[in-house]
Amino acid sequence: MRILFMGTPDFAVVSLTALLEAGHQVCGVFTQPDKPKNRGMKLQASPVKEFSISHNIPVFQPVKMKDGEAIGYIQDLDPELIVVAAYGRILPTDILDYPPLGCINVHSSLLPKYRGAAPINWAILNGEKITGVTIMHMAEELDAGDIILQRETPIAPDETAPELFERLAKLGGTLLVEAVDLLARGEAPRIQQDAEKSTYAPMLSRELSPMDWSKHAQTLHNQVRGLLPWPCATAEFGGVRCKVFSADMIDATANLGPGTIVEAGKSGIVMACGGGTLLRVRELQPDGKKRMAAADFLRGHPLMTGEKL
């Protein structure tokens, strides 16, 4: 099938690869414009652009979707189907209506739950036990189109957002190829979403980062896992602000006020949390320093047991 692909991050590369391996003709790729990165502010191409160039696929990076440039490219490419995976742009009606087989999207949640930009992170932040991937027909309303296929997968208790991203990307690629085959045969279903059950997964921000020790340790454990790789959970230890990269719950309780240091040693920093629960911080990164084990941090910033942060 002649397909125009739209995507930007590593998650999308997996879906693009799956289409190529299934023998489909990817006639072109839309991806976000190059963006300045790091201290030198050097322009950085998206993972999808880098992959496409290496596979001799024409790349297009329209700045806007409604000024005529994007639809002009699409008319020249004349795809039978448009596939979208984490592109980061809303498609206007003229683009949605152009391909004979329509536009479909690879979304990393079990719609209608977690519509929006960060479904994987929010599933972990909210303590979900199950998530999955949805392939859907696209509509003007965000992530509200009719469902073609869905597949669920459990979220492991200690699984981080990057780990879940990787698993769902692979699942999404597999499911996408199945959906394209159904479309080619004229057998793709249209299962309407129940809008009353929809939830929203907005973009992440640094406002989500500060850890509140009065919360249950499970909530804080979810926060650490769900905010990786950015913006990361943060906490102050001995007056030093740190990003927290790794933590785990301890199967014990302590009759201590939230924010009390229960232990600070080789195994990390054990903190008293809400409801008497305990959380061990294993890996962190002080501002301006490299990422390190909590035990290494303690060598230069000793903390006292019983001290309250």
Image (tube, rainbow, N blue to C red):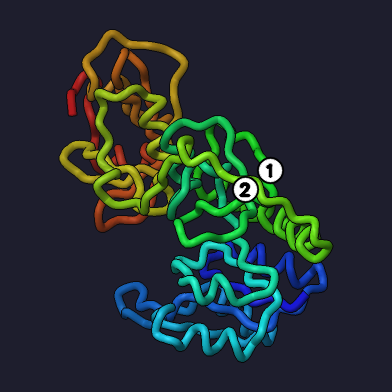
Q: Say whether disc 2 or disc 1 marks the residue closer to the N-terminus.
A: 2
Residue drawn at point x = 42 percent, y = 34 percent: 126
Counting from the top left corner in percent of width and height, residue 7 is at: 55, 69
Residue drawn at point x = 75 percent, y = 63 percent: 180
Choose between 271 and 175: the one closer to the eye.
175
In this picture, is 129 found above or below 86? Answer: above
Are dots 2 and 1 in contact, CB under 8 Å?
yes
Residue drawn at point x = 32 percent, y = 11 percent: 254
Disc number placed over residue 151 in the picture, else none: 1
Disc number placed over residue 200 in the picture, else none: none
Choose between 111 and 306: the one closer to the eye.
111
Choose between 107 and 209: the one closer to the eye.
107
Q: Amino acid at mark 1?
A: Arg
In this picture, is 4 found above or below 265? Answer: below
Counting from the top left corner in percent of width and height, residue 97 is at: 57, 72
What residue is shown with label 2? 133
| Residue 21 seen in the current view | yes
Mark 2 falls on what kind of element?
A: strand
Counting from the top left corner in percent of width and height, residue 62 is at: 45, 83
Counting from the top left corner in percent of width and height, residue 157 is at: 54, 30
Query: Is 305 placed left or right of 188 in the picture?
Result: left
Q: Amino acid at mark 2?
A: Val
